Image: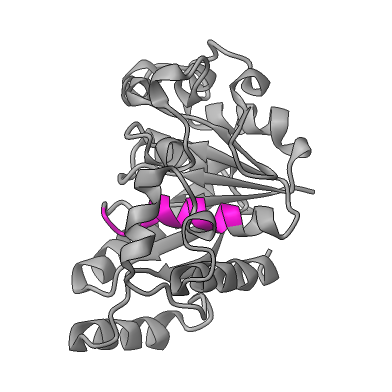
Amino acid sequence: MSKILAFANQKGGVGKSTSAINIAAAFSLMNKKVLLVDCDPQGNTTSGVGINKKNIRASAYDVLISRADPSAAVIPTGFDNLFIIPSNINLAGAEFELVDAENREKRLKKAIDAVKDRFDIVIIDCPPSLGLLTVNALVCADGIIVPMLCEYFSLEGLTQLLMTVKEIKRRYNPSLELTGILITMYNGRLNLSQEVAAELKKYYADRLIPTIIPRSVKISEAPGFGEPIQYYDRHGKGTEAYNAAAKDILKRL
């Protein structure tokens, strides 16, 4: 049975797309066949694995509005065992077009159900919002990974996100679980980072992923070259951290 993970956080700039890419790549290097689903109109996950957004024939947008068969939208990346349903700016219009659509919250689930048996793990990168695209991702996911920074506003956002998850679980997807909270861009020299990390351990100890992703120039650079960190900096600290985090997550699936 394939597992579906949604990477979600309504705050932007928390390393969500970067984490989705690098955790997916880590799984693929463990001989897992992985499908990335880019549900963010910015398309950062798409470009982050080297796909030119201008050359996409069928995207997440086409799938959500039922203009393309889901299998036609799945394309290989240049990395072993790693595939993607890409995205571009067209996806920004999907929320408006689906407002009056029947079963609008389940459009992505229907699409993923059609292709998920071809993969061991499906990772959905959500936009930085709690709108219809994120709701679609949570409705079809088995678990949610929340990448977050060690900042106080992030703690407030986490509470809001978990309330949304609780509501989705109640109304649409009883099997949805919080798989883990992933601390990203951590700088242990800052008192604030240490304080927020301590708060997270206090209240979410059982949901906190043990491996912390450090702040790293290489991690920031890799998407610009269209490569997961494992290929851009094979033996760096960022690679070691994401590979270890992927193993932590795999134990929870």
Residue 87: where, in percent of width, then height? 43, 29
Residue 143 visible in the current orientation:
no
The image quadrant of residue 35 is top right
The image quadrant of residue 16 is bottom left
- Residue ID at (54%, 26%): 107
Q: Nearer the viewer, residue 123 or 23?
A: 23
Residue 21: where, in percent of width, then height? 49, 50
The image quadrant of residue 84 is top right
Placement of 82 over or under 142, stated as above or below: above
- Residue ID at (71%, 37%): 116
Provide the residue span drawn in magenta.
13-25
Residue 50: where, in percent of width, then height? 47, 37
Q: Nearer the viewer, residue 70 or 98?
A: 70
Drawn side of residue 62 relative to residue 184, left or right: right
Residue 172 visible in the current orientation:
yes
- Residue ID at (30%, 69%): 149
Counting the numbered discs, the total is 0
Drawn side of residue 225 relative to residue 27, left or right: left
Taking the magenta stretch, the answer to whether it contains residue 44 is: no
- Residue ID at (51%, 14%): 57
Q: Nearer the viewer, residue 47 or 101?
A: 47
Placement of 85 over or under 152, stated as above or below: above
Report the magenta stretch's main SS. Answer: helix
Residue 63: where, in percent of width, then height? 54, 20
Q: How is the image coloured?
A: one colour
Placement of 115 over or under 121, stated as above or below: above
The residue at the far top in this view is: 67
Drawn side of residue 164 relative to residue 121, left or right: left
Drawn side of residue 113 relative to residue 57, left or right: right
